[in-house]
Image (tube, rainbow, N blue to C red):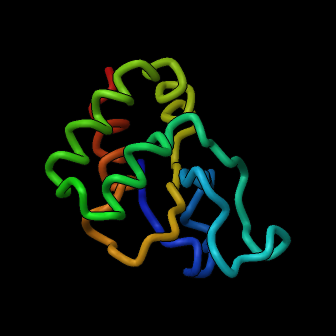
Amino acid sequence: MIHCKRVYEPASSEDGYRVLVDRLWPRGMKKTDLQYDEWNKTLAPSTELRKAFHADFIDFTAFREAYLQELAGHAPEGRQLVAKGNVTLLYATKNTTQNHAEVLAGWLRSLP
């Protein structure tokens, strides 16, 4: 199963393999305080795409489509992550519904 969770929420035993999927380290979080198994920058949105979305140059729909195009080239990495079983994608953004981790989770769930 693939789950999403903010890095500021406490870890739980149900989380399974915890992966930080932000390109930048979360603001205000000490590296020693975050419980995670992997920091995967490869599957995070590109810097250009992230900046365009956060600066409101593009809306979420356009961001989602562009991000899915970026992810298309990373299917092997995605399959490796899915193979770990129960995975929680960790992200820092405040928006819990329109964010890259939710897009990534949907993409991972759709991998053959």
Nearest to the observer: residue 67 or residue 8: 67
Q: In the drawing, does residue 51 fall left or right of residue 68?
A: right
**Residue 101, quarter of picture:** bottom left
Q: Is residue 109 above or below residue 55?
A: above
Residue 24: horizontal and vertical position, in percent?
Answer: 62, 57
Residue at the spot 33% in from the left edge and 64% down from the top edge: 55
Q: Is residue 67 above or below residue 35?
A: above
Q: Is residue 68 above or below residue 27?
A: above
Q: Is residue 101 above or below residue 96?
A: above
Nearest to the observer: residue 11 or residue 34: 34
Residue at the spot 60% in from the left edge and 42% down from the top edge: 41
Q: In the drawing, does residue 24 fall left or right of residue 45?
A: right
Residue at the spot 33% in from the left edge and 72% down from the top edge: 96
In which quadrant of the rendered image does the C terminus lie?
top left
Residue 16: horizontal and vertical position, in percent?
Answer: 60, 56
Q: In the drawing, does residue 97 fall left or right of residue 27?
A: left
Nearest to the observer: residue 59 or residue 41: 59
Residue 1: horizontal and vertical position, in percent?
Answer: 41, 48
Residue at the spot 68% in from the left edge and 81% down from the top edge: 28
Residue at the extreme right of the image, as rendered: 32
**Residue 64, quarter of picture:** top left
**Residue 14, quarter of picture:** bottom right
